[in-house]
Image: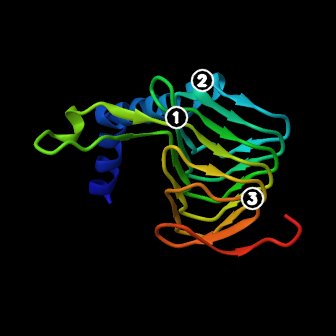
Amino acid sequence: MSSKLSSFLFSLCDPRTYLHVVRLLHYVNYSHVRERGRMSVGPGTGIAPNASLRNGSRIRIGHHSHIGERCSLWAGESTGRIVIGDHVSLAPEVFITASDYRFVAGQPFRDQPKRERDVVIGNDVWLGTGVVVTAGVTIGDGCIIGAGAVVTRDLPPGAIAVGVPARAVSQRPNA
């Protein structure tokens, strides 16, 4: 019993314990709190506290939308914007990025300039769990994107899309 007690007391005195708390606070501030203040968010919109946001000044979300747990909205560093319409639902772990790397043979990709293009998501859109939306994509009003899909091309209004890459397999009635 004294061994467990001494281990517990030692952990309270170990500075690494408190350093971890500081790292955690820094991460939350870096990836959510500071960027949330830079975003344009409509009334009635909810954003999960563990959403990851980059370059919030280039992210706009309409009213009555929902950004689920562990979603990532990464706008470009200089020009790439993310525009999300009204009444949009992002399920957990959706990843949307407005920039990617160019690929030139013989040069490490991290040394190449990024290519930034706007992502536009219309009104009344639902993105299922784990959907990835790449730079330059427009998703039309009323679309439903199935879980795990990777959206690399524009989708017309009312499309129901699934797969990698995402393809429209049906059309929403009255959309």
Residue designated by label 1: 75
Q: Amino acid at mark 2?
A: Ser
Q: Report x, y in % for residue 73.
A: 55, 42
Residue designated by label 3: 157
Residue under the image location 51 percent in, 31 percent down? 80
Looking at the rendered image, the quarter that the N terminus falls into is bottom left
Q: Is residue 134 left or right of residue 90?
A: left
Of residues 28 and 34, the one nearer the viewer is: 34
For label 3, the SS is loop
Residue designated by label 2: 57
Of residues 123 and 18, the one nearer the viewer is: 123
In primary-sequence order, the first of circles 1 and 3 is 1
Whole-number angstrom distance, CA of label 1 to CA of label 3:
23 Å
Q: Report x, y in % for residue 7.
A: 29, 49
Q: Amino acid at mark 3?
A: Pro
Whole-number angstrom distance, CA of label 1 to CA of label 2:
9 Å
Of residues 82 and 31, the one nearer the viewer is: 82
Q: Report x, y in % for residue 82.
A: 60, 37
Whole-number angstrom distance, CA of label 2 to CA of label 3:
27 Å
Q: Quadrant of residue 108?
A: top left
* Disc number lying in front (2 or 3): 3
Name above or below for residue 175 compared with residue 102: below
For label 1, the SS is loop
Q: Amino acid at mark 1?
A: Ala
Name above or below for residue 55 compared with residue 99: above
